Amino acid sequence: MNANPYLPVRAKILEVVRQTEQIATFQIESPGLNPVPGQFLEVSIPKVGECPLSISDFDSDYIELTVRKVGKVTGALNALRKGDHLFIRGPYGNGFPLEKLAGRHVVMVLGGIGLVPVKSIVNRYYQNGGVKRLDLLVGFRTPREVIFQEELARWQEKFNVVITVDQGEPDWPGRVGLVSELVKEVAGQERAVAIVVGPPAMIRAAAEELLKSRVAKEDIWVSLERRMSCGIGKCGHCKISDQYVCLDGPVFNYRQVEKLVD
Ligand SMILES: Cc1cc2nc3c(=O)[nH]c(=O)nc-3n(C[C@H](O)[C@H](O)[C@H](O)COP(=O)(O)OP(=O)(O)OC[C@H]3O[C@@H](n4cnc5c(N)ncnc54)[C@H](O)[C@@H]3O)c2cc1C
Ligand code: FES
């Protein structure tokens, strides 16, 4: 994208959609990026800092980011409005191996903002087809933390979408319990391929259930989050064992990383 890989470009915020109190989706101008779903950008605000964020959706003229406010940079991003600018470099990382999902029974097991890196894939399957069957199992801590509510409702027209929360509330109509517990309801019938994104304990629990349902380790694709700095394999911040999460990942198959999910 640039001669100097650390030099970010300025991008205008076209739209902001508030998902929850802590989470917002930003549609920003795309400087001609053509990402693969699952890749990420390094996003910065001058004098505040930089952080990696997954691309939650994209088209030829926009990129979408979905940000949970947890600290300095994400807090400053959360305060931005339509018409403001931020800075981006990337896209980085490998993205999901979509060719391995084509025509298959796909099971996605996603925790909270784990939905972010797969949103563009589900939207494309919704619009164009491409898989035999899609089970989308999504877990949130509470009903107030459910994101992409419109999209989840739309996807239910074509796919099996099951939403569960760890702690229900009196008017919550959905399921209560761990998302990994839903795997056995959908994964055993035919040889499935899976995508798992979420915190490490959830990844481990979901992978164990998928393995019990005879999904092969090579067919379980996980996206890992690690503290990053350069995003391009130079600084070593994200290295686990001999893998650079920013460069070799963030998407790995479970055989590659089963001992590295901590
Ligand atoms: C490949 C990749 C993709 C990501 N995609 C998204 C995304 O789409 N949306 C999103 O909201 N976040 C995403 N994250 C996480 C995001 O990068 C961190 O939340 C962010 O770096 C925090 O920066 P900060 O300055 O706001 O927080 P800081 O002020 O640096 O820290 C605040 C708190 O957050 C914790 N923290 C910081 N970084 C991380 C991290 N990487 N993982 C877990 N905890 C962290 C710190 O330990 C501290 O407790 C992604 C991370 C990676 C590596
Ligand atoms: S973030 Fe620098 S090597 Fe991965």
Image (tube, grey):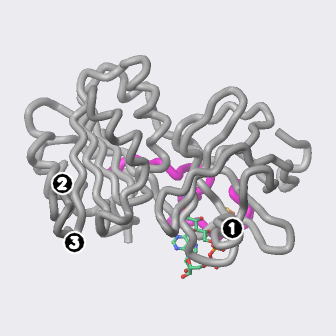
Q: Amino acid at mark 2?
A: Gly
Residues drawn in magenta:
230-255
Q: Amino acid at mark 1?
A: Ala
Q: Amino acid at mark 3?
A: Gln
Nearer to us in this view, 25 or 125 = 25
Q: Residue at x 43, y 21 (%)?
A: 127
Which of the numbered marks, if any, corresponds to residue 174? 2
Q: Is residue 60 magenta?
A: no
Q: Are marks 3 and 2 in contact (CB under 8 Å)?
A: no
Q: Residue at x 31, y 68 (%)?
A: 141
Graded by Cα atoms within 10 Å as few (under 14), some (14 to 19) or many (20 or more), the crowding at tag 2 reads few
Earlier sequence position, callout 2 versus callout 1 = 1
Earlier sequence position, callout 3 versus callout 2 = 3
Picture coordinates of residue 45, whole percent (x, y)? 79, 65
Which of the numbered marks, if any, corresponds to residue 79? 1
Looking at the figure, which quarter contains the C terminus? bottom left
